[in-house]
Amino acid sequence: MLLQDIFINRKKELAEISSGIALGQSFIIIAPRRYGKTTLIKKIAKDIESQNQVIYIDVMRYAHSVISLAEAITEACLAKIGITGKLRNWLKNIDVKLDLKIKFQELEVDIILEQIAANDGYNALAKSLELAEKLALKYNQRWVMIYDEIGELQHLDEQAIRVMRSVIQHHQHVSYLFAGSQESLMNNIFISNRCAFYRFGIIYQLAELELKDVVEFFHASLSNVNSEVIDFIIDNFHGHPYYTTNIFYRVIQRIMLDHLTSFGLSDLRTVIQDLLSSETHYLADQVIRLNQRKNTFAVLLAASLGDPYQTESKLSKQSIHATLKNLVQDGYLRNNAGKYQLTDPLLGLYLRDESLVL
């Protein structure tokens, strides 16, 4: 079993989104990093690919320029009809450009090439987005365009977002699945009534895994794991998708490598030590980032201990409130009916230095 093959529940989201796409509906998935967003997207893509042409675009890779995004979309669309290669290479080859123009005149690929050559980003983006609809219509198929980390476009250019909406809102043969991990960015694009994509599709905000599903999964898969081990994982990781599946995988490894007939809390200590070691650079980087902004580390540490208003440095309530708002926007905290919870439970353990207290 590979780590990426472990998939705990999400059956409701998987079924509803897969069936909705078949009916022409578009969707928006919002979830903090490491909540299984991309894993769910890839499961959906696999579920629907026999009946649809599916294209996956990782926007983060291309958000440095509108031209790069237009190139990526065009190349991905053309690859689906057997035309592979880099647009930059075609720009230098007059014969290839002419061949594309003759064979696919109605697709206007030659115009996209000219716009890219002229560094005409917005028009190239518009034409590349139209390409999916034209191909879907030409081949009488439903196409599904998946844009992962779409929120990154806000760092690039709001005009690019407006161009996207102005083009794809008219599409009848393409369904869209947008996903992002920074809640504040996604809210600005999809939820605010002033945003370009307001009410564009059905919104799913992924929460932690249902705890009963985690318990059932562990019991069904690992009969030799003691119940207190599962209780500890539930109490400290709260159904966090990434850490729950990661720990599950490490427990299996430990049982197999050490030929264990039972697995208790002392064994779990080793697993969590290994997990912390593998995540050391990530956790240390998070702490460095937190310390770069005034009050942020102190407030997050207090939140991890249960009450963000009980900071060691005795900050004012006004200052704490402002810091909490920023931490929520940046995805470090979730506000559940006035109770603040870290979105990354391992970071909480790391901050409290309680990871080895079992």
Image (cartoon, rainbow, N blue to C red):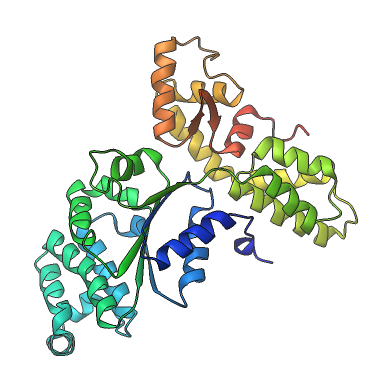
90 versus 145 height, above or below: below
The residue that appears at 82% across and 46% down in the rendered structure is: 267
Q: Position of residue 32 (x, y in %)?
A: 48, 43
Give the left or right position of residue 169, taking residue 34 as reference: left
Give the left or right position of residue 218, taking residue 21 as reference: right
The residue that appears at 24% across and 42% down in the rendered structure is: 195
In the picture, the quarter occupied by the C terminus is top right
The residue that appears at 24% across and 65% down in the rendered structure is: 171
Examine the image and state in which quarter residue 236 appears.
top right
Is residue 239 among the parts visible in the rendering? yes
Q: Position of residue 108 (x, y in %)?
A: 14, 77
Give the left or right position of residue 198, taking residue 251 as reference: left
Of residue 332 and residue 207, the one placed in the foreground of this image is: 207
239 versus 38 height, above or below: above
Is residue 292 among the parts visible in the rendering? no
In the picture, the quarter occupied by the N terminus is bottom right
Q: Position of residue 310 (x, y in %)?
A: 55, 13
Of residue 97 and residue 54, the one placed in the foreground of this image is: 54
Examine the image and state in which quarter residue 221 appears.
bottom right
Examine the image and state in which quarter residue 60 appears.
bottom left
Q: Position of residue 8 (x, y in %)?
A: 64, 55
